[in-house]
Each structure stands twice: as C-alpha cells, then as structure tokens.
Amino acid sequence: MAIADVTQQFVGSIQDVLSAVTQELLVIVVFFFSLLLWKHIGDRSKSGKPSKVVVSSPKTVPKQPRKDASVDRGSAKPLDTTQLKVLQSAEASMMQLLEQREFTRALNYYRTFERDGQDRAFSEATVSAFVQSAIRVGKLDVVERLLHSAKRHGRVLSTEFWRTTLKMLSSRKHLDTCLAIHQHWGSSLPADKVIFSCLINGALEHGAPERAATMLDCYCQAGLDPKDHVLLFRTYAAVNDVDSAEKVFRDLGADMSSLMTNLLLLTCVKAKQPERAMDRLHEACQIQKTRPSLGDANSVDNDPMVDVVSYNTVIKGFAQAGMLPRCFDCLHEMRSHNLEPDDVTFGTLLDFCVSDNDMSSANEVVSLLMNKEKPVDTVTCTLFIKALVRAQKLPKALEIYAEMKRAASNGGAKPDIVTFSVLIKASVDIHDLEQALQLVEDMVAAEQLPDDIILTHLLEGCRYVGNHALGTKLFADMLVVGVKPSEFTLISMLKLHGRCGAHEEAYQLVAKWESLYGAKPSVIHYTCLMSGCLRTKNYEQAWLAYKLMLEMDVQPDETAMATLLPSMVAAQKWQRVVTLVEVALKSQPRIPISPEVLNSSLKQMRAAAANGPASELQILMQTANIRIHR
C-alpha cells in the first residue's frame, strides 16, 4: 500500500514538470513566430514606399544645430510696436537713473529686459551709458557682461563707443579688462589709433609686451601721424626688437623726434649692442643736419632728433658693457656737438669709475664737472660727494667740497645742510672727529644751522674716541642754538654715557627726557640705559633703570629681558630672576624667554643652594609648560 502511494506521488510530480515545460515551450514558440511576422511586415512597408525620401520633400526644414544656452531664444522674433514703445520708455527711465547716480537701481531695471533677450533692442547710447557708469563705480564684471551680451546679439559697436570705453578703462588702470576686450573682440575692433593706443599701452603697463607687439599691425592701419610712432618704439624697446625699430627709424627719417631716437638707442642698449646704438646715433646726427633749422618756418618740428638724453643712453650702454674709453669718446663727441653734459652724464660716468676703482678716470670726471662753463648746482655736487663717500673715497669728496667753497665765494653753488651731513658722518665713520668738528665750524660760518642728525653724528664720534666731556658740551651747545633732539639723539647720548661710565647722568637724562623735550622714551632707550650699566657690571644701576621703566608704564620686551635676566643670574640676584621670569610669563602677550636660559638659571640656583627661589622658578616653568631638564 505504501509502494502504491509513492508510485502515485512520483507519477504526479512527473506530470507537473511536463505541464510546466509545455507551457514554457508554447510561450517561446509564440514569441518566435511573432518576431518573424513583424520583421516580414517591416520589410514590406519599406519596399512599398521607395519614393518618399526626406531630402526631396519641399516642406522639410533642415535640422538646426542646438543653440548654446547663452543665446537669446527670442532674438529672431521681431518686437512689435507696443514692445518698442515700452523699451523706449524704459531706456529713458534707466538713463535718468544713471544721471542721478542710481546705478544699482538702473542695472536691476535693465536686467528685467535682459532675461528674455529684449535688451538687444536698446540703443548703443544706453549700452554706453551703462558701461561708463559701471567703470566709474568699479563694477568691471558688469562691463564684461554687457559687452558679452552685445556680442551675443551681434551688435556692431561704433568707434566712438570703443574710444570712450577704453580711454576710461585705461585712465583708471583697469588693464586686465582692456586686454580681455582685445582677446574677445580683437578682430571686430575698428582700426583706430586711439583704441589701439589704449590697448597697446595697457599691455605694456601690464607687463605683457608680446601682446602689445601683436596689436601693432592694426595700430599702423589707422593712418598714423609721425608723432604717433612713439608707441611703436616703446613696444620695440620692451621686446628688444632692434631690427623693427631701425626699420621705422629709416622710414620716418627727418620726421623722427628726440624721444623716438632715444627709444631706438635704448632698444640697442637693452639688447647689449652699444656699438650699434652709437652707429644709429651718428646716423640720426647726419639726418638732423638735413632738416630745416629750428627757427625755419618750414621746420617739421622744433624738437631735435638728438639731445643730451641720447648721448646719456649710449654712455650708459658702454658703461654697462665695461667699455670706459668708449664712454669718454661719447662724452667728447657730445661736447663737440655743443651739448653740455648734465647730472646724469657725470653721475653715470662717476658711478662706473668708482665701481671699477678707476680713480684717474674719476678725477677726470670731477675735473670736467668742476670746470664746466655752466655753474654746477649744489644738488649735483652733493650727489657726487655721496657717490665718492659710498666708494670710501672721502679725500676726493673733500676736494669737491673745497671747490664748492671756492665757487660759493664767487656766487656759485654753496654747500647745504645735506652736504655737511654727508661729510660729517663720513668723517665720524673713520673716527676723524677733528675733521668732523672742522666741518661744523665751516657750517656755522656759512650760516647753516645744524640739525639733530648732525648732532647725532657728532655724539657718535665722541663715543668712538671716548670723549665724554666734548659730547656733553656739544649736546648743550646744540640745544642753545635751537636744535631739537630726537629719539636717535637720546640713544647716542645714552651710548656715550654708558661707554664712559656716566650711569647716573644717563639715568637722569632718561628720567627727565619727556618733561624737557616732550617725547616719552621707549623700551629701546631703557634697554640701552640698562646695557650701558651692565657694560661696567653695575647691576644695581641696571635694576634701577628697569624699575624706572616700569614706573613710567613702559613694558619690557624680549630684548630687554634678554639683556637684564642673564646679568641678574650672573650677580646671583635670585629673587630678581624669579621676578623677571614671572613678569615675562604672565604678560599678555607672553614675553618670550629661551627655555635654555630658564633651565640654566634654575641649575645655577640649585647649585647655589637657593632652594626657595629655585622652587618658585620651577613652579613658574611647569605652569607655563616649559620642559625642565634633569
């Protein structure tokens, strides 16, 4: 009975499996025949319509490329009369707002029409007014947006629009915006010399001379006058293009100005070709001879082609190349053409002679300077004296000073306070106090009143030689004649007192300085006072100076602490050491002290069995998270 049941169950399972498989097979067969049927119908449909080709249909519109998101979708749709009247009224309102300096309100109103592309119908006058207003208020992003919108709408902007816009941008040094305009509108910009002069000058000032050079072709198409060619020479000088500069030079010929000639010569010099510059200078001189005289009514221009600057430029080129003989050749040729050397000429020559340590040539330059037919002014002589002092040639500088004194007696240039100050400091620097004092006497004889700078120099000289009595006398005498001492004078006096051990005088000077001279001593002066006391190991006087500083409400700094703290350690004034560290660590902001200095101080305290101060210092260091060395 059990076997029969099992057999029945097995047979039932077989029937279920066959039934499921049969259903699946039926679905597959139906899908296969459906696929064949649809394919057959499709083939018949294609073969039954051979004449209906899309291209041949006259009503078919070619598929247009997809518009960029920035293109106004309504730009092809013309505006009706009502819309135009609305826009004209809006323009009038916006122009009124701009005239009233209501830029933000006008711009917001403008943007209501910009959203659906109606701004394309605004006049150029409106666009120009918005651009100019945006430039005035510094809204360069608005300028770029308005110009981008104009280009998107295919608007052709007038030459006058670009002139006004670029002149405003250039005058306000918005050079990035100028260059951006050239980048986006370059081929569309009118070939106008005003427009491209703004762009070229902008590129040159922006440090992009290569960009400027690419604009020269359009600039030259604008019908240039001779004077307009200066911009070409400026650009060629910036890019070191000697060949192009020479071509323009020969094309202009007698129409060249001295500025153009000098730029040409500068281009040669920058290209490290001074001989080529000299050749062009000779060529310019020959062309100048063919021009009508300057007083002639037919003269092209009263500006000569060659001037003093021309020769100075070539001299500088030879000097940079280390060709001193050629510098003097150029100098002599310059004088043969009745051109007098100026301060730049002599300054260039003298600097080169001094740097090359060629004192014989320097003497020649000085002789030429002093023997000029035209009197040399005080500033020029002082510049020469400074150059010689810088080169440590004080005797030669004093020779020029002597010539100035001689010239002054004949009504020429006389030394001024700057001249005396330079020479006095130079004398003090070589510790020749006698020479410095002689110069002071000359100064008084010349009715030149000394100032605090000269007083400071003299006090430094007294410190060098340790003459305390002379220093204090000079200080007192200068006050009598009306010299107002400065903070630098105070420092010099403190150094002099410290050098000579006059600590009490230094202390009293600082204590009374504000009441006597109206200026409060700074932490620098107190540090200088303490340093002078410590020079002679006068620790008590140094501590008194520190206490005076605190009484005067002057806070110590890192230098003051670094000056005083080690001295208190050396003097084994342990409680003062703790006091200084406590002030430094609890100040706001904290006064930095080296951890090594603190650990060294702690170690010496322990070695001296100063347990109380050592414990206090250790606690301060631990509280400040300063690592303690074991």
Image: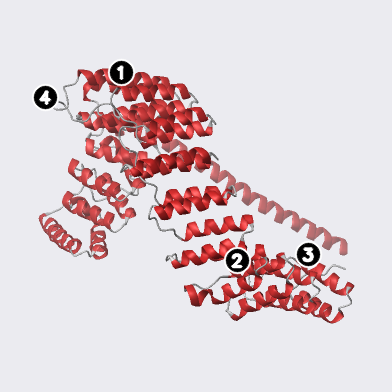
Which x, y percent locates residue 311?
35, 27
Report the residue marked by disc 2: 494
Looking at the picture, tell me which residue is in the foreground, 486 or 130.
486
Label 3, residues with CA under 10 Å away: few <14, some 14-19, many ≥20: few
Q: Secondary structure at mark 2?
A: helix
Q: Amino acid at mark 4?
A: Asn
| Mark 4–mark 2 distance (CA, rounded to whole Å) | 73 Å
Q: Nearer the viewer, residue 588 or 40?
A: 588
The label nearer to you, 3 versus 4, is 4
Q: Residues within 10 Å of mark 2 (few under 14, many from 20)?
A: many
Q: Quadrant of the C terminus?
A: bottom right
Query: What numbered label is drawn on residue 596?
Result: 3
Q: Secondary structure at mark 1?
A: helix
**Which residue is found at the position 31% from the left and 20% from the top?**
247
Q: Residue at x 25, y 53 (%)?
A: 131
Residue drawn 45% across the image and 36% down it: 40
Q: CA distance from mark 3 to mark 2?
A: 31 Å
Image x and y of residue 521, in percent: 55, 71
Q: Which residue is mark 4?
A: 298
For disc 1, the marked residue is 283
| Residue 457 screen position, x and y as percent | 53, 56
Q: Is residue 622 left or right of residue 198?
A: right
Q: Earlier in the sequence, mark 3 or mark 2?
A: 2
Dot in front, 4 or 2: 2
Q: Earlier in the sequence, mark 1 or mark 3?
A: 1
Relative to residue 608, is residue 142 depicted above or below?
A: above
